[in-house]
Amino acid sequence: MNEILSLFDTQLFTTTIDFSTPIVLAAIGGVLCERGGIVNIGLEGFMNFSAFFAVVGTIATGNPWIGLVSGVIAGMIFSLIHGFATIHLHLDHVVSGAVINILSAGLTQYLLLIIYHTAGQTASVPLSLHDMKYAIPILSSIPYVGEIFFNQTPIVYIMMISVVIFTIFLNRTKLGLHLKVSGEHPMALETLGISVFKMRYLGVILSGLLCGLAGSYLSIETGSSYSENMTSGRGFIALAAVIAGRWSPIGALVASVVFGFINALQYKLQIIPALKFFPTEIFSALPYILSILAIAFAVKKSRPPKASGEDFIVERID
Amino acid sequence: MKNLTTFLINLLSAIIITLGVILYLSSHFIGLPMLIVGIGFIYLIQYKNNKKKAIQSLKSLGKALFIPFIGLVVSLIIVSIILISTGYNPLMTLKTLIYGGFIKSWHSTVLNATPLIFTGLAIGFAFNAGLFNIGAQGQYYVGTAVATAIGIYLPMPSIILIVIAYVVSMLLSASYNIIPAYLKIKTGAHEVITTMMFAQIASSLSGWWVNLMGGEDPVHKYKTDKISTDAWLMKLKDLVPLDHINYRLNVGILVAILTAFVCYFILYKTTLGFKIRAVGHNKDGAKAQGIKVNKIIFVTLLISGALAGMSGVTQVLGLEHRMTYDLSSSYGWDGISVALLASGNPIGIIFSAFLWGGIDSGGQYLERVTDIHKSIVEIMKGLILFFVVARYIYLYINTKFGITKKLFKNISHSHTP
């Protein structure tokens, strides 16, 4: 019994947050994108690309904040390719996302060589955002909870704030409502004289921004360098979180934290002697198995945005 | 009498084509002209009395190849710009790449193309029903693991063993797709996410599978034991009594090409194929015609899984003879590009698989003889894919700037899968 209780120490929860932060950010990006009507399986590619540029920015200037900005901008620029391909070029959204993922892997591999003349991994950044850990004065002294939530690194705080901001954005602002309509009934929006194209671009760019944060988190906050394939399927778990969270930022937060928790737990379970009988690989498959279960049980009740994934062509007379 | 001559000529050209294919694939380039002559004969017989039809079929072929060709050219131009801006000579580089991929290291192109044809077919077959089996990598792992297990532990005579390996691996890798297929038809969960998750599960578990089959061996860590030689596929070297055939080339490539033709037959000449394409084209229309859409989706995903599994089996029985714990192997992912390039057409997939395999082996050759890293080919692959798949871009440029009035008139709005 003690063994089980000892699992649930603060470390478990800090690792949970560690694992879930990039997934939460990417999932909110996915939510915004799909609410605007664009299916985005390129989250993985956006994250990979911005993880690389966050490191480039940090190494070039020595300042991780500039690295973060360059990572986010890279993510947004890269997301424009997806936006352009799906909105203006009327390419199938899933196909475009797949192409984005392939393109992102190739580009980063080549740029890695051109800029740093090494394959596989960059050098470590001189200063990472992890060194910017900030304890919020009074809150962090709350026992247990304070250590977990209020003694964190910058992007974790940004993640917490962005959940709130984007929930308000989607439900309480005019722009957010327009974004939602462009994913539900684009023709209605167009009749009002509001451009569906612009709204959809907005969704895609916001997802690029959030994936930029997620990618930067991986490379210059928890890690200190970029290595090939470092996103390792997180973008797809984020997609599962979008569905399991029923296309809302709060839902995405909950789903991602559950995935993060399971992932943190499986590392702990691996070292329990009683469970030594199972091969460790089964534990590392746990989060994926869980996300399938989540999808299996969540999807029936949740409904995707009606026009999500649908092409929008409008004949203008001007 | 006339029928008999036609039959004889057809038979003759079939023999010439088969011989040509085998020779060509085993690095004897005399096979290529033989192949072309054989196809020419069949073409002549087919359209002997109907010139109009002959021209028509050539035209439609040209139309189908037009966009891929333009895409290839545009992406090569962009790659050249990238090469110039990073200080390399683009003409020399591309020449080396093509020489390496399609002449010098042709055998490794063939070896690369074999699994890619299968995974490309797996994904392309599903495209025809409007499905995107993005997790072919997972089914590939299952196929490899099962084939290895059978090859190591089942003592059987050669032919039977190979057949059993194929059948069982195909069944199991098809059933690896049962849950995604079931979720798709029961809850509407998108197959992209579910098959992707299953691929991640398989790639997590593959290390364990390797360990189970002798991966603990300190010398061959991350590799299983070798399968028994009875399970090996025949080498092309033993099939054709000629010199200079690379010892690694095997009949797997012939199986792959044959499978592509079988897929073509299923899709375009059978009722099942018609139903699959109907579902892909318009689900509601298909339903109105009395086609059981859910059943078709289920069956298509299972067939797709089996095809991806075949890729794994062929790779184990033909080339590697063991399973390797190799997370960077990416036949499942590259299969996506191969299938997209060919817009899901089984015959087209053969060619795009060879293109991809050739670019890969050309990249390796390039890295050996020059100081350019092979990752340039990754960019090249991405760009080719983008400029072929996003075919609407040419129409967009055209309407925006009006460069060419006639050229791009025929591009439709329709999407790839």
Image (cartoon, helix red, strand yellow):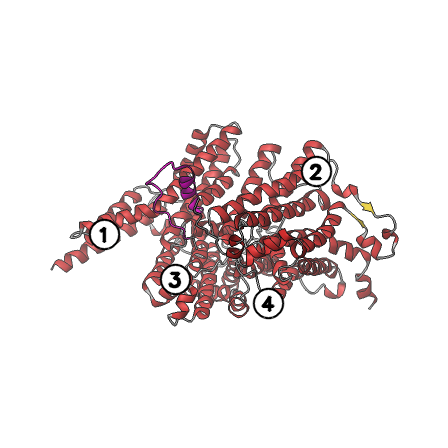
Task: Tell me the kind of residue under disc 1.
Answer: Ile
Which percent across, then down, holds residue A281? 65, 59
Q: Looking at the picture, does residue B79 appear above or below residue B262?
A: above
Provide the residue designation for mark 2.
A124
Q: Is residue A21 left or right of residue B127?
A: right
Q: In the rendered structure, are the residues bearing label 4 and label 3 in contact, judged by CB atoms less than 8 Å apart? A: no
Element at label 4: helix
Q: Residues within 10 Å of mark 4 (few under 14, many from 20)?
A: many
- Which residue in the protein does label 1 denote? B42
Farthest-out residue, left? B1
Q: Which residues are magenta?
A: B389-414
The chain letter for the residue carrying disc 2 is: A
What secondary structure is found at the residue carrying circle 3? helix
Chain letter of the residue beneath label 3 in the structure image: B
Distance from the alpha carbon under mark 4 to that under mark 3 = 27 Å
Residue placed under numbered mark 3 in the picture: B277
Callout 1: chain: B
**CA separation, marks 3 and 1?**
28 Å
Viewport quadrant of the C terminus of chain A: top left
**Image x and y of residue B367, in percent:** 50, 35
Q: CA distance from mark 3 to mark 2?
A: 51 Å
Residue found at x 77% / y 54%: A14
Q: Examine the rendering and report whether any part of residue A102 can be seen.
A: no
Neighbourhood count class around disc 3 (C-alpha, 10 Å): few under 14, some 14–19, many 20 upward: many
Q: First in sequence: mark 4 or mark 2?
A: 2
Residue type indicated by callout 4: Ala
Quarter of the picture containing the N terminus of chain A is bottom right
Residue B417 lies, in percent from the top left, at: 43, 55
Which residue in the structure is indicated by mark 4? Answer: A296
Q: Mark 4 and mark 3, same subunit?
A: no
Instruction: Please report, as a chain letter, where disc 4 is located.
Output: A
